[in-house]
Image: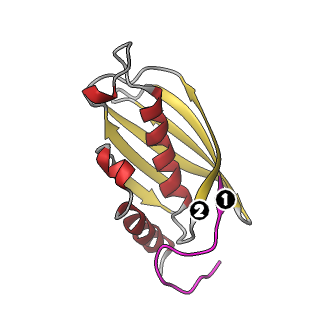
Amino acid sequence: MTPQTRAEKSAAAMWATDKASQNLDMRIDHIAPGNATLSMPVADTMLNGHGICHGGYIFTLADSAFAFACNSYNQLVVAQQNQITYLAPGKAGERLTATAVEQSRVGRSGVYDVTVTGENGRTIALFRGLSRTMKGQHFEEEMTR
């Protein structure tokens, strides 16, 4: 199995039960080993008291992209620590895009950076996720590394 096929099958297996991402109308725009791009429209129900996208929804989009990136090797991986810095507001009706890129993956630990952008390309937030690999697979296959 190619690494790309493994990443696609892992994403499909995760997506099938990821009700949080599905219910926020996220979509997977790109998946590859160690990388994922997800996007989400900013619905009126996501606006805070300032009329901009609530930071929790931006965090959730970034966290979902992080999850799909670090789970792209058909190994069960969870978040160990995450942090986010908000740089610009998400606007009502806009589609936000979160692009996760693997920075390091050694042993059971990984480091992933996620950039959340708005439709005009402005940077909305920067997110760093630290991952931890658990026992198990998303689908049955002989593990090779």
Determine the secondary structure under disc 1.
strand
Viewer-proximal residue among 140 and 29:
140
The image shows residue 43, relative to residue 11, as above or below, that is above
Determine the secondary structure under disc 2.
strand
Q: Amino acid at mark 2?
A: Val
Q: Residue at x 28, y 45 (%)?
A: 25
Numbered mark located on residue 106 in the image? none
Q: Which residue is mark 2?
A: 77
Q: Residue at x 42, y 20 (%)?
A: 89
Q: Which residue is mark 1?
A: 132
Percent of width and height locating residue 19: 35, 54
Place residue 120 in its image quadrant. top left
Q: Amino acid at mark 1?
A: Arg
Graded by Cα atoms within 10 Å as few (under 14), some (14 to 19) or many (20 or more), the crowding at tag 1 reads some
Q: Are marks 1 and 2 in contact (CB under 8 Å)?
A: yes
The image shows residue 5, relative to residue 118, as above or below, that is below
The kind of secondary structure the magenta stretch mainly shows is loop
Viewer-proximal residue among 57 and 103:
57
Percent of width and height locating residue 68: 48, 56
The image shows residue 110, relative to residue 100, as above or below, that is below
Q: Residue at x 27, y 31 (%)?
A: 43
The residues colored magenta run 131-145
Q: Is residue 34 visible?
A: no
Image quarter of the C terminus: bottom right
Residue most toward the right? 107
